[in-house]
Image (cartoon, grey):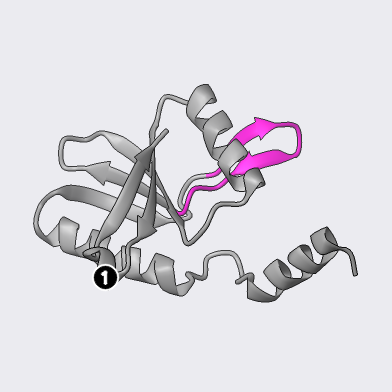
Amino acid sequence: MTNSRAKTATQALGRLKVGQMNKTEAAYDAHLKHKQLAGEIAWYRFEGVKLRLADNTFYTPDFAVMRADGVIELHEVKGFWTDDARVKTKVAADQYPFRIVAVKAQSKKAGGGWKVEEF
């Protein structure tokens, strides 16, 4: 099996059904619930928005988030980036008027919390 085929086969094993969160997304969901209870965000939804980037090419961010001030943000939760995911995120940020925020869980050793990257 070639290196790229092996990578694809490994990734396919870890894919979840649409609408089902992985462990990192579930942890971020809990983080968003806490921020909602604190009044920092008004609303959020997992996979609540799907953006068309080109013919037969779409971007579905992990979370659509409405901050308390009414601004809508798109949040992408990553354990690691694939080239395809980073390109789609950058293209979406260029084409649409949303602030796109990528978050990555930090280890407890690194202080915990979420590392944030804006697009």
Q: Nearer the viewer, residue 99 or 46?
A: 99
The quadrant of the rendering that contains the N terminus is bottom right
Q: Which residue is mark 1?
A: 109
Q: Nearer the viewer, residue 32 or 107?
A: 107
* Residue in the picture at 47% in, 57% down: 78
Residue 59 shown in magenta? yes
* Residue in the picture at 32% in, 46% down: 116
Asked whether, in this view, residue 24 is left or right of residue 84, the answer is left
Q: Is residue 56 above or below residue 106?
A: above
Q: Nearer the viewer, residue 86 or 92?
A: 86
* Residue in the picture at 42% in, 33% down: 119
x and y percentages locating residue 101 in the rendered image: 37, 42
The quadrant holding residue 107 is: bottom left
The quadrant holding residue 105 is: bottom left
Residue 14 shown in magenta? no
Asked whether, in this view, residue 43 is left or right of residue 24, the answer is left
x and y percentages locating residue 77 in the rendered image: 43, 56
Which range is magenta?
Answer: 50-62
* Residue in the picture at 31% in, 52% down: 115
**Residue density around tag 1, few if under 14, some if 14–19, many if 20 or more, within 10 Å:** few
In this view, the residue farthest toward the right is 1
In this view, the residue farthest toward the left is 38
Disc 1 residue type (three-letter): Lys
The quadrant holding residue 51 is: top right
x and y percentages locating residue 32 in the rendered image: 25, 59
